[in-house]
Amino acid sequence: MRKNLKILVPVDFSRHSLETLRFALSLRDYFGATYVLLHVVPAGEAETFATLGGESSEVQTRRASETLAELEREAERRRQEVPGIELACRVAIGVPFKEICRLAEEENFQLIVIGTHGRTGLSHLLIGSTAERVVQHASCPVLSVKPQVL
């Protein structure tokens, strides 16, 4: 009998993160998986919008609402491709790796499937890697998927 695995899939809407989502959904063939798609709006991004007009909390709320709608559209496309799949969507505001790890721990996920952007050298040194930080800090196993693997 298959174990029902609870999988968290962070999505930033890049081509690679959507390919990683497709890969994560294929795990359903091996486990009776349920999924939560998560997008994290970086807190600094919302603050930047706030300086252009409006209060920070209003801008954050609007940005989170728009992002949730986009995530729900993506989830619906995936439900059409894989009938019967259990997909929920969440949006958080904060530091991406911290929010991913926080949600994984709070909701007892058994696995995080996250794509990497494949940055190396100076770009990796300056920008860092959300996936790398999630691997270091997550309370559950993390499957990190490189772009060339897909």
Image: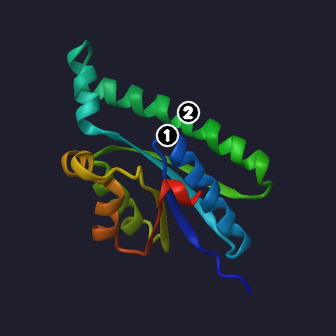
- Mark 1 to mark 2 CA distance (whole Å): 16 Å
* Relative depth, front residue between 27 and 54: 27
- Residue 20, image quadrant: bottom right
- Residue 25, image quadrant: bottom right
* Relative depth, front residue between 74 and 92: 74
At numbered mark 1, what does the secondary structure look like: helix, strand or loop? loop
Q: Residues within 10 Å of mark 1 (few under 14, many from 20)?
A: few
User: What residue do we see at 74% from left, 87% from top?
Assistant: 1
* Relative depth, front residue between 48 and 126: 126
Please indicate whether residue 102 sits to the left or right of residue 31 in the image. Answer: left
Which residue is at the far bottom? Answer: 1
Three-letter residue code for mark 1: Ser
Q: Residues within 10 Å of mark 2 (few under 14, many from 20)?
A: some
Mark 1 vs 2: CB contact within 8 A = no
Please indicate whether residue 147 sits to the left or right of residue 93 in the image. Answer: right
User: Counting residues from the N terminus, which is met first, the one under dot 1 or under dot 2?
Assistant: 1
Estimate the x, y position of residue 81 in percent, counting from the top left.
77, 49
Estimate the x, y position of residue 111 in percent, counting from the top left.
49, 71
At numbered mark 2, what does the secondary structure look like: helix, strand or loop? helix
User: What residue do we see at 71% from left, 82% from top?
Assistant: 2
Image position of 76 with respect to 49: above or below: below
Q: Mark 1 = which residue?
A: 14
- Residue 12, image quadrant: top left
Q: Mark 2 = which residue?
A: 69
Estimate the x, y position of residue 83 in percent, counting from the top left.
80, 54
